[in-house]
Image: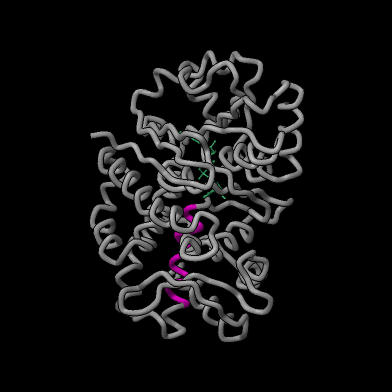
């Protein structure tokens, strides 16, 4: 039976193709009328399988940095694509992680009023989470993900062979998003993942099962709420705090690890506000702390955290919108809270709790 997924979107269905032979046949996904945007690290690490693609003058290599997914830097990429005579019937192909995805998706949704794009995710985070869901998120200077569009890919080709070369911090980052998706699914899903957590980084078949499972869970939410107006909001669990940590540490903490720290902070804040039991907090904590590793010790000033939280695009005019686990089943829930002295104290305690 095929593992492929068919995801419904406002532009029609698109397929996620699980293709473990992809590394030997990359030419299949980058045909003549394609412009490939490839992560420069992937170009170095996979020079042989990518030889024909890299020899094509239309291929652009991009360093996967947060600076490069700013609107200011993306203009240079658009200029190169225009110089390379991109046309509306051409396809952009992204080969890389979430950064290359965001750059490609954003350009594909705006250039020539929209061109198709295809995605080959090469990080665990992109394979298990970001490759579906239509979103592009782009930075304005150092303000993270403040610009964006909804423009699904026409196809995703997923090969876990790329994960062999990932650095440990990027494996943790991907596992962070897998934890998030399972927390959203149910307490049972979370606990099952927690019991497998110790084997995830070394057992490829197990990891593949969780990648597939995470995408299946996310698929339910994005098909019901592609434009993030309702139930999809819960996918921001860990993200308001996580983005704040990324900004406060100048992106020294990888995205999915910051999200893991953000989930731990959200849980602690919820317990201190009386909306999550101490028992539920204790149940969830070990996997989160373990996945953070030494990053949990990164100093984050409460003032930087609060300043970054105040900029979050989900906020209403006078209240902060955060996603917290709530109630007996730790249901991941959208909550509006006042940015007051009590919240500041709760954040301070939660930040201190990361380092214990
Ligand atoms: N659009 C969305 O839906 C969405 C969702 C989640 C996150 N994001 C964004 O994604 C970004 C994070 O993405 P990411 O975690 O995939 O990281 P990334 O794209 O920043 O890549 C992380 C590092 O891994 C390297 N790399 C990529 N593939 C590799 C491989 N196979 N082997 C070795 N090194 C490899 C990259 O060069 C980079 O140094 C953030 O900017 C985040 O905001 C977007």
Of 304 and 228, the residue lying toward us: 228
Q: Relative to residue 199, is residue 133 drawn left or right?
A: right
Residue 37, percent across and down?
Answer: 60, 29
Question: Which range of residues does the magenta coloring cover?
Answer: 256-269
Of 354 and 161, the residue lying toward us: 161
Of 188 and 88, the residue lying toward us: 88
Q: Is residue 262 magenta?
A: yes
Q: Is residue 311 above or below residue 209?
A: below
Residue 309, percent across and down?
Answer: 62, 68
Q: Residue at x 40, y 53 (%)?
A: 218
Can residue 40 be seen at all in this image of the molecule?
no
Which of the 4 image quarters holds residue 68?
top right
**Quadrant of the snapshot with the N terminus:** top left
Residue 24, percent across and down?
Answer: 39, 18
**Quadrant of the snapshot with the C terminus:** bottom left
Residue 62, percent across and down?
Answer: 63, 31
Which of the 4 image quarters holds residue 35?
top right
Q: Residue at x 54, y 66 (%)?
A: 241
Q: Relative to residue 301, is residue 236 drawn left or right?
A: left
């Amino acid at each position: 039976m095929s593992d492929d997924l068919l995801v419904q979107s406002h532009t029609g269905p698109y397929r996620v193709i699980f293709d473990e032979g992809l590394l030997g046949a990359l030419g299949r996904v980058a045909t003549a009328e394609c412009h490939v945007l490839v992560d420069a690290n992937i170009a170095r690490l996979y020079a042989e399988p990518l030889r024909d693609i890299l020899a094509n003058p239309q291929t652009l290599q991009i360093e996967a940095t947060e600076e490069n997914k700013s609107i200011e830097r993306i203009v240079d990429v658009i200029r190169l694509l225009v110089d390379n005579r991109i046309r509306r019937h051409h396809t952009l192909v992204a080969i890389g992680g979430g950064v290359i995805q965001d750059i490609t998706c954003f350009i594909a949704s705006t250039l020539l009023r929209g061109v198709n794009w295809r995605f080959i995710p090469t990080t665990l985070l992109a394979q298990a989470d970001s490759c579906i869901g239509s979103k592009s998120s782009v930075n304005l200077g150092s303000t993270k993900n403040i610009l964006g569009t909804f423009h699904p890919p026409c196809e995703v080709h997923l090969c876990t062979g790329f994960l062999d070369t990932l650095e440990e911090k990027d494996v943790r980052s991907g596992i962070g998003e897998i934890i998030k998706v399972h927390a959203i699914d149910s307490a049972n899903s979370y606990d099952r993942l927690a019991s497998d957590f110790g084997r995830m980084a070394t057992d490829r078949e197990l990891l593949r099962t969780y990648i597939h499972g995470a995408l299946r869970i996310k698929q339910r939410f994005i098909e019901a709420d592609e434009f993030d107006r309702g139930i999809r909001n819960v996918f921001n669990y860990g993200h308001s705090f996580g983005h704040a940590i990324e900004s406060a540490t100048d992106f020294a903490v990888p995205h999915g690890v910051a999200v893991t720290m953000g989930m731990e902070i959200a849980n602690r804040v919820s317990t201190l506000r009386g909306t999550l039991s101490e028992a539920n907090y204790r149940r969830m904590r070990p996997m989160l702390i373990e996945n953070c590793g030494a990053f949990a010790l990164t100093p984050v000033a409460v003032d930087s955290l609060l300043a970054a939280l105040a900029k979050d695009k989900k906020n209403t005019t006078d209240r902060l919108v955060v996603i917290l686990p709530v109630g007996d089943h730790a249901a991941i829930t959208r909550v509006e809270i006042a940015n007051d002295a009590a919240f500041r104290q709760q954040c301070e305690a939660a930040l201190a709790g990361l380092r214990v």
